[in-house]
């Protein structure tokens, strides 16, 4: 027995030595402009070369019937003239001007399409590459697809990324607002690309469509994502952790098996609030309407039932507990409560194809659209003004920011660009209106008002949903997160602020919350706490060392920031130089544990050795 034990221990020691020898060395890459060569080919397709890689991006444009095409040699069903980096083309009822521009890591393609006919022009728009053999890997909207056919829809991770057998990779990224909102990624019959199957162009109107081509010598998904992030300019400082904290009265229950454990709220002392906030390591705290206090959450019903005196008294307590707290309040721009709402909102109803009003999967919660000038949008603007002036909040948590349970409205007013197009005849089946596009002018003005008045904004559903909002959020360092009822939705966080909200479906204890923090790192994503039904919180977790962070690179299992590296994978980690750092290890239950941290100097970089087991994590924080 002793001999068996001895052999087993020696085997484990040997395995450990092998593991240590094979640990990867991980540091941020040195980014330089790539020697990309690009040109518009005689047939209108775009050729992109990087060292020994050559990619040709073809295009299809729907006709009635058939297709006009850009290929390498000769355009089909249209005439084109190419002069340098500009193409002029014409087909039945349309003209197109194409231009290309090289940037540090990509080629930007811009198409300006004009409807020269007298009727609305259905214009399915597709850009794609052809590969004759099986790819090593390909992804649509972040998701790895294992079959040869696939489809993806995402308005944030609006990408198709391919890794050919010869090595390297190429990514396609939709850029302009309409393209992102209508976006579809596809793979079929050796074609891999991105497109818009819902575009309608009005007579005499020019619609601009733009996308980027990212060639890379590297053949992994995250190298593509990180290049796209650099182009979009979304690597800005994320200063604060987030948690919900509302003025709950006594006896509002939680998931705790202990019946005496209530939700934290208005009855708790400043000391209790301070301990709770510290254990969640939160500096942004969002309150909402509390039904036990007689408040309703949405629309004009909120205007009638809100109790600012309760909230202001609670905010005073919070600020005593944490003087630097940023206090937000919940806001949703598309919902009302039918039993209590005002009348006069008919022109803002979100309608189904059958003419009935859409709802939040519940007729008690009807859906509306915030269109500039409507009584509905005026009421919602008044709500935001009340929160700023009467409630005295520091910011807004805006739920379901781009749209809600219905992405489209089937009625007037029309957004001027959206419709259903028959895939066989290529004729317009019906017009429809994108909620994200039709509400964009009003939402943009509200976000600009927040910045003007010094209010912070946290959005659910992605600030990167359109290029307009991406740029506005980046300018003001506003943030957005994705919900994680399905954790793979974190792919949709990767091209804006890489943050996921805790999972309301599975989190029942503080250990569940911690382990989801660890799971989020599988997508290179950070974590925000969700609902207050999880109690109690007895100690800080990895979230304590998660912020502030300025993302540099996202990877599977870790995120590298300027200030810190967060990981759930074993390896040797460096910031890229000789930076001094302190390491904070967390065990499988989210409790910080003391471990010695070995350092190694390699290639003039200082690396910190991290060895982790299942559900464990480490924060490497610059001193």
Image (cartoon, rainbow, N blue to C red):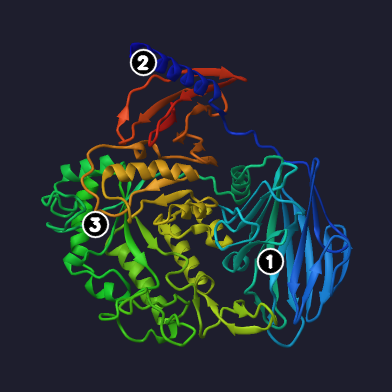
Query: What SS does tag 2 mark?
Result: helix
Picture residue at 17% right of the left edge, 44% below the top: 272
Picture residue at 78% right of the left edge, 71% below the top: 96
Res 150 visible = yes
Tell me if label 2 and label 1 are in contact, CB under 8 Å: no
- On screen, residue 506 above or below 391: above
Q: Which residue is mark 2?
A: 5
Left or right of 368 in this view: 289: left
The earlier-in-sequence mark between 3 and 1 is 1
- Mark 1: give few (<14), some (14-19) or many (20+) Cα within 10 Å: many
Determine which quarter of the picture holds residue 368.
bottom left
Q: CA distance from mark 3 to mark 1?
A: 44 Å
Query: Picture coordinates of residue 544 (x, y %)?
Result: 34, 37
For discs 2 and 1, the disc positioned in front in the rendered view: 2
Query: Picture coordinates of residue 361 (x, y %)?
Result: 36, 74
Left or right of 199 in this view: 485: left
Q: CA distance from mark 3 to mark 2?
A: 56 Å
User: Which residue is more in the foreground, 97 or 4?
Assistant: 4
Query: Picture coordinates of residue 362 (x, y %)?
Result: 33, 76
Q: Which residue is most to the front? A: 1
Query: What SS does tag 1 mark?
Result: strand
Q: Which residue is mark 1?
A: 209
User: Which residue is more in the foreground, 315 or 217?
Assistant: 217
Query: Picture coordinates of residue 593 (x, y %)?
Result: 32, 27
- Mark 2: give few (<14), some (14-19) or many (20+) Cα within 10 Å: few
Q: Which residue is mark 3?
A: 246
Check the picture and name the quadrant holding the N terminus: top left
Tell me if label 3 and label 2 are in contact, CB under 8 Å: no
Picture residue at 57% right of the left edge, 28% below the top: 576
- Mark 3: give few (<14), some (14-19) or many (20+) Cα within 10 Å: many
The earlier-in-sequence mark between 2 and 1 is 2
Left or right of 528 in this view: 580: right
């Amino acid at each position: 027995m002793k001999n068996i034990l001895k052999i087993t221990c020696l085997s484990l020691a040997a395995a450990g030595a092998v593991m240590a020898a094979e640990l990867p060395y991980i540091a941020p890459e040195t980014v330089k402009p790539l020697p990309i060569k690009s040109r518009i080919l005689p047939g209108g397709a775009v050729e992109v070369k990087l060292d020994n890689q050559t990619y040709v991006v073809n295009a299809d444009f729907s006709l009635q019937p058939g297709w006009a095409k850009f290929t390498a040699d000769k355009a089909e069903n249209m005439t084109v003239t190419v002069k340098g980096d500009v193409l002029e083309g014409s087909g039945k009822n349309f003209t197109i001007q194409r231009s290309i521009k090289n940037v540090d890591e990509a080629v930007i393609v811009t198409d300006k399409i004009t409807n020269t006919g007298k009727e609305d022009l259905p214009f399915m728009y597709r850009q794609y590459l052809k590969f004759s053999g099986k790819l090593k890997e390909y992804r649509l909207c972040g998701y790895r697809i294992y079959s040869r056919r696939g489809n993806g829809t995402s308005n944030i991770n609006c990408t198709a990324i391919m890794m050919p057998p010869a090595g390297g990779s190429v990514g396609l990224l939709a850029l302009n607002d309409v393209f992102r909102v209508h976006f579809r990624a596809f793979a079929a019959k050796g074609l891999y690309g991105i497109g818009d199957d819902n575009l309608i162009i009005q007579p005499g109107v020019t619609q601009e469509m733009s996308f980027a081509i990212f060639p890379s010598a590297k053949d992994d998904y995250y190298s593509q994502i990180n290049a796209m992030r650099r182009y979009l300019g979304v690597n800005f400082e994320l200063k604060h952790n987030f948690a919900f904290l509302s003025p709950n009265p006594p006896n509002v229950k939680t998931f705790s098996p202990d019946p005496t454990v209530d939700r934290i709220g208005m009855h708790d002392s400043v000391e209790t609030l301070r301990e709770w906030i510290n254990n969640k390591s939160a500096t942004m705290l969002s309150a909402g309407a509390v039904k036990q206090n007689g408040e309703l959450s949405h629309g004009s019903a909120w205007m009638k039932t809100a109790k600012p005196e309760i909230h202001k008294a609670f905010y005073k307590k919070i600020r005593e507990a944490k003087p630097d707290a940023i206090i937000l309040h919940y806001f949703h721009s598309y919902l009302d409560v039918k039993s209590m709402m005002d009348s006069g909102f008919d022109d803002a109803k979100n309608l189904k194809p059958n003419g009935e009003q859409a709802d939040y999967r519940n007729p008690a919660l009807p859906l509306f659209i915030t269109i500039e000038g409507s009584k509905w949008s005026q009421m919602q603007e008044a709500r935001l003004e009340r929160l700023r002036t009467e409630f005295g909040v520091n910011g807004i948590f805006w739920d379901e920011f781009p749209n809600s349970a219905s992405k489209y409205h089937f009625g007037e007013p029309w957004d001027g660009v959206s419709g259903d197009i028959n895939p066989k005849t290529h004729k317009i089946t019906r017009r429809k209106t994108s909620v994200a596009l039709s509400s964009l002018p009003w939402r943009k003005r509200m976000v600009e008002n927040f910045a003007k008045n010094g209010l912070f904004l946290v959005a659910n559903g992605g600030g990167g949903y359109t290029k307009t909002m991406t740029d506005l959020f980046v300018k003001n360092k506003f943030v957005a997160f994705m919900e994680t009822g399905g954790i793979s939705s974190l792919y949709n966080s990767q091209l804006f602020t890489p943050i996921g909200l805790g999972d309301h479906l599975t989190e029942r204890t503080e250990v569940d919350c911690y382990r989801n923090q660890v799971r989020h790192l599988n997508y290179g994503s950070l974590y925000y706490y969700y609902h207050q039904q999880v109690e109690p919180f007895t100690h800080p977790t990895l979230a304590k060392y998660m912020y502030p962070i300025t993302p540099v690179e996202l990877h599977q299992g870790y995120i590298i920031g300027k200030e810190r590296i967060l990981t759930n994978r074993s390896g040797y980690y460096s910031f890229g130089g000789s930076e001094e750092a302190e390491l904070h290890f967390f065990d499988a239950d989210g409790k910080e544990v003391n471990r010695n941290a070995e350092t190694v100097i390699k290639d003039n970089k200082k690396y910190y050795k991290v060895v982790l087991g299942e559900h464990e994590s480490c924060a490497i924080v610059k001193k």
